[in-house]
Image (cartoon, rainbow, N blue to C red):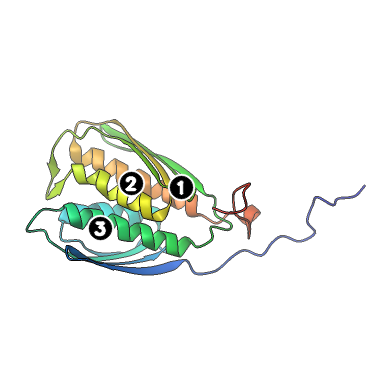
Amino acid sequence: MSNALIPSTAAAADTTARVAEVQRNTAETRVQVRVNLDGTGKARLNSGIGFLDHMLDQIARHGLIDLEVECAGDLHIDGHHTVEDIGITLGQAFAKAVGDKKGIRRYGHAYVPLDEALSRVVIDFSGRPGLHMDCKFTAGSIGQLDTQLVFEFFQGFVNHAGVTLHIDNLKGFNAHHQCETIFKAFARALRFALERDERMAGVVPSTKGSL
């Protein structure tokens, strides 16, 4: 009996470095982002907003992504341009680092609790930007971060990374906990979606052949 459908040798694992550096300079902000998608969770962060740095650190630590973010923004106005532009630049860096997406799992999801709070994040490196976020923050700000800007951060990321992203805060009455569970779940979903799948080595995970 022929085994024509069974390859005689396994495809070689892709060991290409998935790193990128992106700079974005406007009249409102100057942002520089470096990422290593196959890192160990190291972070060097200076957004100018302490709580945002704390959330970016969650992405690095729980996503096992080495991340550097440096931003000089017009914080004398408010945090909007800084938060949004970091999201944009981070998205651009991810798109550049992930490349043609051959061999990745593509989809990722995670549930993360923190005391009374629980969030779910689902991501698809689809090439199609789409954000669906449901979180009713119980406070207007956390430290210096306006909670309305969490949506703007993820919208900037989604538009420039080319991903579909669903974020749901399922429970929580402490805004710090709500936000932290979102970012931790986002990190874990990223980690799973970006993992190399040995069974899909060299293959784009789509029936269309491209993403």
Q: In 3D space, how far apart are the residues under numbered discs 1 and 2 (Cα atoms)?
A: 23 Å
Quadrant location of residue 67?
bottom left
Q: On the rendered structure, is 147 left or right of 202?
A: left
Q: Of residues 85 and 139, which is closer to you in this image?
A: 85
The residue lying toward the viewer, choosing from 211 and 123, is 211
Q: Is residue 65 visible?
A: no
The residue indicated by pointer 2 is: 184
Which label sits in the foreground, 1 or 2? 1
Extreme residue toward the front, this view: 27
Q: Note whether residue 55 is visible.
A: yes
Residue type at mark 3 is Asp
Task: Kindly identify which residue carries mark 1.
Answer: 128
- Tag 3 near tag 2, CB within 8 Å: no
**Earlier sequence position, callout 1 versus callout 2:** 1
Relative depth, front residue between 73 and 197: 73
Residue 68, horizontal then vertical, whole percent: 30, 66
State the residue position of label 3. 85
Q: Position of residue 53 (x, y in %)?
A: 22, 57
Name the residue at 51% across, 54% down. 195
Q: CA distance from mark 1 to mark 3?
A: 20 Å
Question: Residue, x 63% and y 56% (percent of image)?
Answer: 203
In the rendering, which numbered label is found on residue 188?
Answer: none
Q: Relative to the observer, which residue lies in front, 46 or 81?
A: 81
Say which amino acid is labelled 2: Lys
User: Above or below — where is 33 with respect to 182?
Assistant: below
Mark 1: few/some/many CA within 10 Å (<14, 14-19, 20+): some
Q: Is residue 195 above or below residue 176?
A: below
Q: CA distance from mark 3 to mark 2?
A: 20 Å
Q: Nearer the viewer, mark 3 or mark 2?
A: 3
Residue 47 in the image: x percent, y percent?
20, 61
Give the residue drawn at x 15%, y 53%.
79
